[in-house]
Amino acid sequence: MLYRLDKLSFCYGQTPVLEDVSLELQAGTFYGILGPNGSGKTTFLDLISGHKRPSGGSIRFNGRSLDRYGKKELARQIAMVPQDFALSFPFRVEEIVLMGRYPHLPRFAAPAGKDQAMARLAMEQTGTAAFRNRYITELSGGEKQRVIFARALAQQTPVLLLDEATSNLDVKYGLQLLQLARQRNRLESTTVVAVFHDVNQAACFCDELLFFKQGRLLTSGPTATILSPPTLKDAFDVQAKVFYEPELQARQVVFKPPEPDGAHQPGRTLPGDSKPKHGQQQPTDGQTCLD
Amino acid sequence: MPTGRNSLAPITLLLGSLSLALLALIVLSSGLGFVTIPWPTVIRIIGSGIAGAEGLLGEVQELYLTVVFDVRLPRILTAAAVGSGLALSGVVFQGLLLNPLADPYTLGVSAGAAFGASLALLFDLSLFGSYTVPVFAFACAGLTLAAVIYLSASAGGVSSNNLILSGVIVTAILSAGISLFKYLAQERVSVIVFWLLGSFASCTWTDAALTWSVTAAGMAVFLYFGRDLNLLCLGGRTASSLGVEPGRVRMILLLTGSCLAAVCVSVSGIIGFVGLLVPHMMRSITGPDHHKLLPASLLVGGILLLGADTVTRALLPAEVPIGVLTALIGGPFFCVIFRKRQMTI
C-alpha cells in the first residue's frame, strides 16, 4: 500500500479545511478526486505531497511517516502539477523542464546526458519541444501548463499529483496530457492522484474516485460502481444521468438543469428559484459533456 | 542554459570581460583625482603592494604611494564592494519576493540603518569610537528586520506580500522617527543629512576588508542555494514539489541578503538604485538563472558604484553625495528599462 491516511485534518487558523479523512491509496492506481469548490481537494493534494503539514492525524507513505522524509527525497517520489504557478521571470522552456531533474542531482552537479534526454522526451510527449528555447513568460496559459506538465514527467517519480492540471487547456491537449498520465500509470505503474473539474474526464481516466464535500471524504470506490446518480446528488447537489459509453468503455454523466419551478425537486430550495429564466444555479461541472 | 560546454562559453566570456573591466576601473580610478597619477605607476604601486616587492616601486614618489594606498584604494575597494553587495542583495530579494520592484531596502533595512545612524549622530554618541555610527546603523537595521519578519509572520505566514507590506509599514514609522531626529538636531541637522545621502569619503582599510568579506560570504551562501533560488522564483508550492524546503531556505536567504545590505548601508550611508537597477539589467542579459545572474550582478554592481564614486570624487568640480548621484543617473535609466520591458506587477 502506498499511502495510509489516518484521521487526517487541516485548519487554516481556526477554519477547518479538511476533517477526519481516513483512507488508503494503492500503488499503481489512477485516482480521481471530485467535489465542489472549497471541498478541500487542493489541500488534500498539498498534504499528501508534503507541502503542508496536517493539523491532525497522520500520513504514512510507503510505510513511513511522511514528515520523516527529506524534501529532496520526497521530490524523487512525488511530482506535482499545480493549477496556478508563478512565472514572473523569463526562464526558457527547456530550463523549466530540466528543473524536474534537480531532485535527482547533487547540489552542484550539472544535468547529465541522461537528464537532458529525459527532459527532451518529456517535451516531445507534451508537444512543447517546438518552443523549447522560448521564454516561459511569452507563452499562453495552455502552453505554460503543458511545460509544467513536462517538468513533472521529467521528474520521473512513482507518484504523480495533478491539481486540475488540464483545466486551462483546450480539450485536445487536456485529453492528450491525461492520456500521457494514463500511459505512465499503465506502463510504469505510476500512481496518479488527480483533482478533476470535469466529471466525465475523471470517469474516463480513473480507476477509483474519491468524492470530497465540505472538507470531508464523502465516499470512494471503483469508478465503475461509485459513479452513480445518488453519489453525484450527494456530492454536487444536482440531478444527473449516468450511462455506460461503450466507445470509451467508461461511465459518463449528463447533468440535468434544475427544474424551473423546483416543484420536482423536493427538499431542494435554491435562492434563485423565483427567477427561473436566469438558471445560473447550474453547476459548471461536467459542462463539456454537453458540448 | 545548462546544455553542456557550448553554452558555457558566452557566460564565461561575459564574466571574464566584466572582471577585467572592474580591475581596469580600479586602476584607472586610483590614478584619478586631485593628484593625477599615470596608470603604469599605479600598476607598479599596486603590484608592489600585492607582491610585497619594494623593488617594483623604483623611484615612485612617496606622495603617490600615500595617495594610492592610504587615501584612494580603501575608498575605491569599499565602493566596489558595496556596489557588489547591494546588487547581489537586490537579485536575491527580487527572486524571493517574486517582485521585480523589490530591492535590498524593501524589508526596511535602510530605514533601520538610517534611524540608528541618526540616533548616534543626534546624541553625538561615541561608545564604539569612530565605529559608533556604523555599529548603531547595523544594530538598528537588524532590529528592524526582526520586527518586519515578526510582523509578517504574525499576519499569517511569511509570504512575499506580507513581507513587503510589513517592510512598508515599519519603514514609514522609522522615517517619521528620522524626521523627528532631524527636527531635534536643529543646526546639527546637516550631519545627519550628509550621512543619509551616503558617502565613501572617509573609508578605511577596515571598511574595505569588512565589506569585501561580507560580500564574499553572501555570494557563497547565495551560490550554494542558487538552484533553490531558481526554484523559489517559481513559487513556494513548486519549489516544495521539487525538493526545496521553502520556509527554511527563504529565511536563510532573506537574512543573508538583509545582513549584506545592512553592512553596506552602515559603511556607506543609503545608496539607492544599485540594488534595483543592476539585477534588472543583468537579468535581461544572462537570463534569470542565478548561477549566472549572481556573478554578473556582483561585477556590474561593483563597476557601476565605483564608476559613480569616481565621477563624483575625481571628475566633478565639487563632490556630489553618492546617493544623490546614483539616484540621478539610475532613476532616468530605470525609466528607460521600465518602458522598454513594460514590466507588469
Image (spheres, coloured by chain):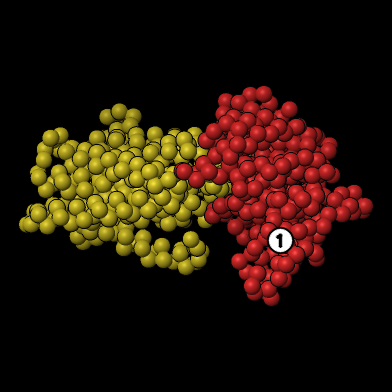
Chain colours: A red, B yellow
Residue found at the very far top of the displayed protein: A63
**Which residue, given by chain and number where applicable, does mark 1 sit on?**
A266
Residue B54 appears in which quarter of the rendering?
top left
Residue B328 pos. (x, y %): 31, 63
Q: Residue at x 41, y 66 (%)?
A: B335
Q: Quadrant of the C terminus of chain A?
A: bottom right
Q: Label 1 is placed on what type of residue?
A: Pro
Number of marks drawn: 1
A180 w.r.t. B53: above or below: below
Q: Quadrant of the N terminus of chain A?
A: top right
Name the residue nearer the viewer: A161 or B225: A161
Q: Chain of mark 1?
A: A
Residue A151 visible in this rendered orientation of the protein:
no
A25 w.r.t. B309: above or below: above
Name the residue nearer the viewer: B210 or A188: A188
Residue found at the very far right of the displayed protein: A246
Q: Residue at x 56, y 48 (%)?
A: B234
Q: Residue at x 78, y 34 (%)?
A: A28
